[in-house]
Image: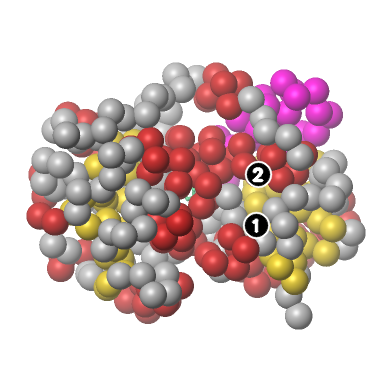
Amino acid sequence: MREVVEPRAREAPSALVIVGQPVAQSLSPTLQNAALRHAGRAVVYTRCDVASTALGPAVDDLRRARTGGNVTMPHKEAMFTLAAHTTAAAERTRAVNTFWWDGDTLVGHNTDVDGVMATVAALCSGGVPGDVVVLGAGGAAAAVLVALALSPLTRDARVLVASRTRSRAERLVALAGGRTAALAHMTDVPWARAGLVVNATPAGMRDSDDVPVPVESLPAHTAVFDLVYRREGTTWVRDAKARGLPAEDGLRMLVEQGAAAFACWFGEPPSRDVMWHALGVPRPDAHAPRP
Ligand code: NAP
């Protein structure tokens, strides 16, 4: 029987990794190692490239070494099923992006929810003037839906999930519970009513010119949130800003989910300024509320 626990490690991890495939492009080691050094902690954060078929043995190795860390695509849902103890955020999303050990027991948590809430708060401080459209239906989209339900800025908005695999979208809509989430294929989305569009697909990650939906399809009041991140910004966010739309890529989410994970592992928040400095990107301000 899985036990639901508080998001706080009893014992700080002695080493940290990001588990995923691919992980070479992840900026988590950059920002976490800077924060660890700044906090005077003799812990190193490394990358752990693991194929789906090798996840079980890889987790056994991490257990033996008491190594905690983060999980990225495509393993978030599999780590949820492997965790014997989970937090409320992991239960709600059925996905794990942060883990540690309680003795031999794997504890799974989800700080992507914190990252999404922080970005939505910065992007939509005056509320969302219309529907929220979520593109994609994987582990990150689950965190988006949970964060949208928790945030006072979005919890009353209508949410549309658009995914190329309908069954994954249906599963997400079920997770969103009694909220007004509805299903829509990308081609069915009523863009004219969109107040916030969230890209939770990898579009733009490998091919930097790829965009999830052309910004010309979006009305002038729509806010744009791209979970994909690049130090130089994503094409989709650059296009949106060029049209005058409030837009953010996934860097703020990256820093905020990382800061929340650090606080779970070590019981104290890291320096966010140090994390942003390590990324080589100025720490962004919140966007001015729209009239
Ligand atoms: P995932 O579990 O693999 O889910 C990806 C979703 O995108 C699925 O619904 C998938 O559809 C869809 N998809 C994949 N390729 C697509 C394409 N070319 N066109 C349209 N839909 C496509 O991945 P995830 O963990 O949710 O991550 C999604 C993205 O969010 C990744 O780029 C990841 O880097 C980013 N992310 C960023 C942060 C951050 O801190 N900024 C945190 C978490 C995730 P199918 O089911 O049909 O394959």
Q: Quadrant of ligand 1?
A: bottom left
Disc 1 marks which residue? 109
User: Answer yes or no: do the residues labelled 2 and 1 have beta carbons within 8 Å?
Assistant: yes
Which residue appears at 42% of the width and 74% of the height? 177
| In this view, 196 is above or below 173 | above
Which residue appears at 59% of the width and 55% of the height? 110
Which quadrant is the C terminus positioned in? top left
- Residue 164, picture quadrant: bottom left
- Residue 173: x %, y % from top left: 38, 73
User: Circle 2 — which element?
Assistant: helix
Which residue appears at 84% of the width and 58% of the height? 102
- Residue 22: x %, y % from top left: 54, 50
Q: Which mark is residue 119?
A: none
- Nearer the observer, 9 or 215: 9
User: Circle 1 — which element?
Assistant: strand
Disc 2 marks which residue? 261
- Residue 161: x %, y % from top left: 30, 65
Residue 39 in sight from this viewpoint: yes
The residue segment tinted magenta is 20-45
Looking at the image, is mark 2 or mark 1 earlier in the sequence? 1
Apparent side of residue 171 relative to residue 244 in the rendered image (left or right):
right
Disc 2 to disc 1, how far (Cα)?
Answer: 9 Å
